[in-house]
Amino acid sequence: MNGWRTRYLTGMVVDATGAGMYLPLSLLYFHHVTGLPIERVGVLMTAGALFALVGNPIAGVLVDRFGARAVVVGGYLLRAFGFGLYPFVDSALGMFLAVALVAVGDGSFSPSIQSLVADIARGAERDKLLAAQRSLRNAGLGAGGLVAAGALTLGSDTAYQAIVLGTGLAFVLAAVIVGSIRYRPAAPRVRTPARGGYRTVLANRPFMILTALNVPVAFGYMVLAVALPVYITTQLGAPTSLVGTLYAVNTIGIALLQIPVTRYLVRYQRTRTTAAGAVVIGVSFVVFAALGVVSSSTAVLLVGAFVATALFTLGELMHGATASALVSSAAPAETRGRHLSVYQFSWAIPTALAPAVLTWLMTFSATGMWLVLAAGVTASALALVRLEPRLPQEAVRIAVPVPQPA
């Protein structure tokens, strides 16, 4: 493995492990250290997290001006500084400011890291690198979660603070590792006049359509975290333990299979693979819907739930890394940061709205929710295939990989 690739993937694992340590106790931490009611902590964290939407467009401009690597490193250091403030939080205002600071760094990550991947890899190598990143980040999140689980059994202030400071140190280490990468950009970066701003992106109609088509799929991605637990336990009457098992099937499947699946798929056009993945996700939703209307047999429920989850995981394996490579390749090199920043809103907005939208749909009709989601991702897939001729051909068809980094 090339030295730059090893360093990059090591940075991703360190980053994800740190994040995985903190995610399971985000609400509990501030409830523990401030004594605020858990529901108030939740409201404050949501309000602070909205600042990620601010970090996203700022990152796009900075990437185009200073380069992706600088913004990735800066975002890591900003989050590390924010986590360094957490032990000093003793009020609602202090908590809001610390969370908002970390959220700005979080918002900068997606557009800057995708731009960095586009800088250091091209063609099939780009798809494979994104696949390896996705697989290893899943593994890192899982490892971090295990560390957090072990520390939480202690239940002491020292354990809580150690996890928070460990997360901050992980971001510092990730910044050092990524900052050490030396490479020759796969495409020359050209500074564009500031007066163009985001109007340049909005004028790129094929890219804006590509962005809009991701919205139904992004809602679909949220079902495992938002809709499935409620559906499985309240609508189907299954035990809560099944939710954790299905989630494990998905995360372990991604960690183990993303790299080999992507290596196989690079022979096909990215648009077709992305669309096929969305269709498979839609089929999984139809199976989930069917579970609510077919036999209530426990055996049928268990088999159906595992089949649906396996199909969802397969669709995610086909769609995830390939869609990221398609989008980063469709963005013009000179304004890639801003383009990817705009695209990221197609993930950020559904992520913010999914709890309210999906629970409302489920309240109206659980079966209807799955069918609406299935129709949305299928329509997105069909529209993507129709959009294919209007996208840059180097984004659609994967070129023979040419090693670029030193």
Image (spheres, helix red, strand yellow):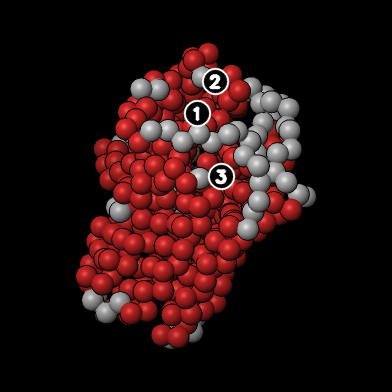
Q: State the residue position of label 1.
A: 332
Which of label 2 and label 1 is nearer to you? 1
Left/right of residue 27 with respect to residue 168 in the rendered view: left
Give the residue pinned by disc 3: 116
Measured along the vertical axis of the image, is residue 174 above or below residue 367? below
Q: Earlier in the sequence, mark 1 or mark 3?
A: 3
Element on which disc 2 rests? loop
Q: In the visual, does 304 lie left or right of 292?
A: right
> What residue occupies the far right of the structure in this picture?
1
- Is 51 placed left or right of 312 in the picture? left
Q: Amino acid at mark 3?
A: Leu
Nearest to the observer: residue 304 or residue 213: 213
303 up-or-down from 375: above or below:
below
Q: Amino acid at mark 2?
A: Pro
Can you give x and y, in whole percent of width and height, for residue 219 in the image? 39, 38
- The residue at 44%/42% (across/down) is 65
Q: Which mark is residue 392?
A: 2
Does dot 1 land on a helix, a strand or a loop?
loop
Q: Residues within 10 Å of mark 1 (few under 14, many from 20)?
A: some
Q: What residue lies at 54% left-to-right and 77% top-to-bottom?
A: 150
- Compared across the picture, whether 339 is left or right of 300 comes to left
For the residues labelled 2 and 1, the Cα–Cα distance comes to: 9 Å
Relative to residue 268, is residue 105 depicted above or below?
Answer: below
User: Residue sitting at 41 percent across and 85 percent down?
Assistant: 157
